[in-house]
Amino acid sequence: MNTRSNPRQRKPARPVVGPRRQQGVVMAIALIMLLMLTIIGVTSMSSGNLQEVMARNMLDRNYAFQAGESALRDAEIDVENNMTAGADFDAACTDGLCLPPAATTDPPVWESVVDWDSASLTREFGEHTGGTPYKTKLAPSLAAPPKYIIEYNDIACVAGLPGEDLRTAVKFDKYRITSQAAGRSSQARIRLQSTYRKRNGRC
């Protein structure tokens, strides 16, 4: 006896399962990582630019410092070769030769009297010493010529100097020198000061 399967009794076929729907998590993570990399890159560029500016400013300051030191040494030669106690020092700082303020409470002459842009109130590097003039050697490297003023302070008597008669004091004229110099940029300016003593006989 042949039995045939009843089509109504067949098991239903399993449905075909398609790919799951994407939720977009991977894309969100990728976008966040891209944003973080962008922030890191921009921060690195800003930091590099800041360090470059700082290095350039430090180099400018170093140029100004070296120029100011050169002006001090030039002024010391000027004092040694050209200055005497009876030189033309006055309260108006004519030609960069100054007298100190009348009162100790008065502002210093390099701030209150001297116009550092005035050629008649300052002395330029190399101008009075016969040394290397500014325009020949320093002009390509500096924004402005180094300048200085010489301030006559007082007479000092110093006893007991090596090689001198210990019973006799040696007389010195005291000069205060103030220099101002710029670096490669006119924004980088520095002001230096020193005291120089020149022997002037015995007390």
Image: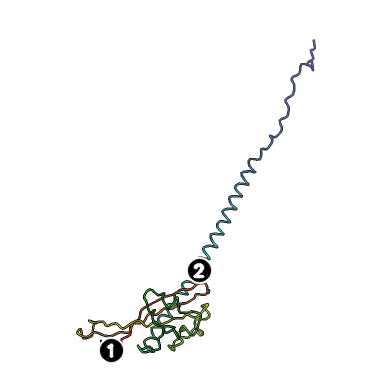
* Label 2 vs label 1, nearer the camera: 1
Which sits earlier in the primary sequence, circle 2 or circle 1?
A: 2
Q: Nearer the viewer, residue 115 or 10?
A: 115
How crowded is the residue under tag 2: few (<14 C-alpha within 10 Å), some, or many (20+)? some
* Position of 41 relative to 143 (above/below): above
Instruction: Specify how the rendered protein is coloured.
Output: rainbow
At mark 2, the secondary structure is helix
Q: Which residue is mark 2?
A: 57
Q: Residue at x 53, y 66 (%)?
A: 53
Left or right: 163 in relation to 177: left
Residue 12, disc: none
Task: Check the picture and name the quadrant holding the N terminus.
Answer: top right
Q: Residue at x 54, y 61 (%)?
A: 48
Q: Nearer the viewer, residue 153 or 198?
A: 153
How crowded is the residue under tag 1: few (<14 C-alpha within 10 Å), some, or many (20+)? few
Amino acid found under the numbered disc labelled 2: Asn
* Position of 68 relative to 85 (above/below): above
Image location (x, y in percent) of residue 37: 58, 52
Image location (x, y in percent) of residue 197: 33, 82
Residue 201, disc: 1
Image location (x, y in percent) of residue 146: 47, 80
Amino acid found under the numbered disc labelled 1: Gly
Q: Which quadrant would residue 27 be assigned to in this image?
A: top right
Left or right: 197 in relation to 15: left
Q: Nearer the viewer, residue 51 or 29?
A: 51
Image location (x, y in percent) of residue 16: 73, 29
- Asked if the residue at tag 1 contacts the one at tag 2, i.e. Cβ–Cβ closer than 8 Å, the answer is no
